[in-house]
């Protein structure tokens, strides 16, 4: 069987099938990442200069348009980081979940455009800088492959790859968010967990995702904060409803106090039961 163009191409193709609002492209070796238009290079966001200012202006305008009020600058920055980090983490977690391959993405190798028509979550251009895989994976024959011993070693690769990409991005956004250290990594932890959990629901594999994420983030895995933090509630008809406790707050309550997220630390269990769909599983 011929190998795909890259170790992660099949994973991103599957992602686009279940989440068509997000597109991922892989520039050929030697080609520059796309620039201009709505594209923002991850390393420019990390630099915290004019590109980040322009990026956050989109969030500021969106809040005013959709909710009829302005958000505080730190809230705008929190929204902007979430809207970048949620899809960016999928670049790493989806290939791991689907094909047990963990690509590495230094910030110099990723660009993001959230203005593309017809793509609610935007598009990512990403060129992996090598990848880790398990023994026996056919992709081990591809350039840039690094074979690791077992599943736990591969989970360590996921944690390292996400941290490698997000650490400079957090440094760029952090001053505008008025958050540091643990608070920023709490948000990063939530992006890892909730992004993959959502995609796994679309794949019909939410239960497996919960198990995998609990192993990925069992606690004491710095710089991440806490565990995957899943737990089960009981619905009005006795059905199980799965939720989790976020390590951070997205600050949406400052814009619309009556409409907090189902996993928000500010949302009590009674309200969570009302917000969670009866089919949550």
Image: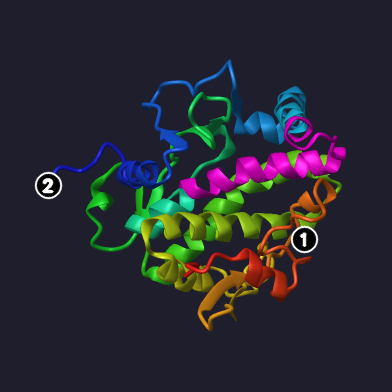
Query: Percent x, y for residue 223?
Result: 67, 62
Residue 1, numbered circle: 2
Considering the whole magenta stretch, tell me its main secondary structure: helix
Give the residue at x 63% y 74%: 219
Q: Is residue 58 above or below residue 88?
A: above
Q: Is residue 84 left or right of residue 79?
A: left
Q: Is residue 149 left or right of residue 135?
A: right
**Secondary element at image label 1:** helix
Mark 1 or 2 closer to N-term? 2
Query: Percent x, y for residue 94?
Result: 43, 52
Give the residue at x 79% y 45%: 174
**Secondary element at image label 2:** loop
Q: CA distance from mark 1 to mark 2?
A: 46 Å
Q: Is residue 205 above or below residue 44?
A: below
Q: Nearer the viewer, residue 239 or 156?
A: 239
What span is in magenta? 63-91
Query: Percent x, y for residue 78?
Result: 75, 45
According to the image, label 1 marks what residue? Answer: 182
Q: Nearer the viewer, residue 105 or 189?
A: 189
């Amino acid at each position: 069987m011929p190998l795909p163009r890259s170790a992660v191409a099949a994973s991103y193709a599957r992602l686009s099938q279940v989440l068509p609002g997000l597109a991922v492209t892989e520039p050929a070796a030697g080609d520059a990442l796309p620039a201009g238009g709505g594209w923002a290079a991850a390393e420019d966001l990390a630099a915290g200069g004019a590109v980040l200012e322009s990026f956050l202006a989109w969030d500021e305008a969106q809040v005013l348009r959709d909710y009829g009020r302005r958000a505080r600058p730190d809230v705008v920055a929190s929204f902007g980081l979430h809207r970048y980090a949620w899809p960016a983490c999928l670049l790493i977690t989806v290939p791991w979940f689907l094909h047990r391959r963990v690509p590495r993405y230094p910030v110099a190798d990723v660009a993001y455009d959230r203005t593309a028509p017809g793509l609610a979550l935007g598009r990512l251009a990403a060129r992996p800088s090598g990848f880790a895989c398990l023994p026996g994976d056919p992709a081990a024959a591809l350039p840039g492959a690094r074979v690791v011993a077992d599943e736990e070693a591969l989970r360590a690769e996921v944690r390292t790859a996400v941290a490698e990409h997000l650490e400079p991005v957090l440094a760029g956004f952090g001053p505008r968010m008025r958050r540091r250290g643990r608070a920023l990594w709490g948000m990063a932890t939530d992006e890892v967990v909730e992004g993959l959990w959502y995609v796994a629901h679309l794949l019909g594999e939410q239960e497996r995702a919960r198990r995998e994420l609990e192993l990925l983030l069992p606690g004491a895995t710095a710089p991440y904060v806490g565990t995957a933090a899943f737990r089960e509630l009981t619905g009005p008809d006795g059905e199980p409803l799965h939720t989790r406790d976020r390590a951070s707050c997205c600050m949406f309550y400052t814009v619309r106090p009556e409409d907090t997220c189902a996993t928000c630390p500010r949302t009590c269990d009674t309200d969570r039961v009302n917000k969670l769909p009866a089919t949550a599983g």
